Image (cartoon, rainbow, N blue to C red):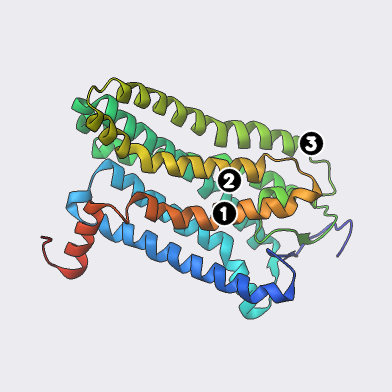
Amino acid sequence: MQSNLTTMRYFIITGISEDPQLQLPIFLLVLLIYLFILCGNMTILIACLDPRLHTPMYFFLGNLSILDMSCASIALHKILIHFIAGDRTVSFTACMVQLHMFGSLGSVDLLILTAMGYDRYVAICRPLRYHMVMSPGVCVTLASVCWGLGFLQVTPFTVIICGFSCYSSNEINHFFCDIVPVMKIFCNDTSFLETLFFVEGFLTMILMPFLLTFVSYMFIIHAILKIRSSAGRLKAFYTCSSHLTVVILLYMTLFGQYLTPNLSSTLENKKLFALFNTAAVPLLNPVIYSLKNKDVKRALKIILYNKKPR
């Protein structure tokens, strides 16, 4: 460990656990989860090639699959490299790139889920105008805005962090370069960065998409309750249940990862929330959304086996 460093060429990533006996089980578990994430999300992308699934819901779901695979690759690769090569170091530049990419993709993820909530709102509350409102051009525009805004929102954090030159340690108590554990090793005054993190990071990047999604579901619930038949209400709720489940899981882990008290006793808990956010949620997304979906199964049968389903 180093103190009062004025230049930083590399950091040391402590990982999920420093216990030598846990390294093999952690490696095998992370590798298995990562492979399932890739296979599950690639399955969705392959299914989306079917012209029958060229709909707004599956268009945004394809974007979400790309985001899940990217976030998992960025966050989990160091755990695998640490076990295989025994190297826990990461250069300053690589750490900043990882921090920026993970934050940006996470922001895009929340915005894409918000767009999916709007899509469900239009489908249930404005069904007669659905194809006009959610036209291909509108979907592409929404997705482009989500990607652009997501990367733009994180840029101020990355620029400010790159300007810090004094660190109390070169050990990052995490399994990847994330903004909160990196902030903990600054010896500079971080009050401005903490204020920016709360105002833009929490209010803009997390709370605003949450509120927009919440408002969409208030209208959706109101519209569902107005449906007279129980079968109609059940069908309407089923069309948005997958999205709602993923939204609840993701926001619960984000609140646990970034908004719990920053005490040393909670660092290990924050790692668990981060691991769930970067591994379990991308793993569950394909299962929750599509792997039990008849349309996806039919599309995969046509694409992979080149035959019509019964």
Q: Secondary structure at mark 3?
A: helix
Tag 2: amino acid: Thr
Tag 3: amino acid: Ser
Nearer the observer, 65 or 291: 291
| Left or right, 144 with reference to 239 | right
Q: How far apart are the two marked residues, 2 and 3, measured between alpha carbons?
A: 25 Å
Q: Earlier in the sequence, mark 1 or mark 3?
A: 3
Tag 1–tag 3 contact (CB < 8 Å): no
Q: Nearer the viewer, mark 2 or mark 3?
A: 2
Image quadrant holding the N terminus, namely bottom right
Nearer the observer, 9 or 191: 191
Tag 1: amino acid: Phe
Instruction: Let me know if residue 110 appears in the view.
Output: yes
Nearer the observer, 239 or 149: 239
Residue linked to disc 3: 191
Residue linked to disc 1: 276
Q: Is residue 254 above or below residue 127?
A: below
Q: Tell me the tag on residue 253.
A: 2
Q: Earlier in the sequence, mark 2 or mark 1?
A: 2
Q: Quadrant of residue 48?
A: bottom left
Q: Is residue 172 above or below residue 159?
A: below
Nearer the observer, 85 or 124: 124
Image quadrant holding the C terminus, namely bottom left
How far across and how far down the image is residue 270, in percent? Answer: 68, 50
Q: Residue at 25% across / 23% down in the picture? A: 227
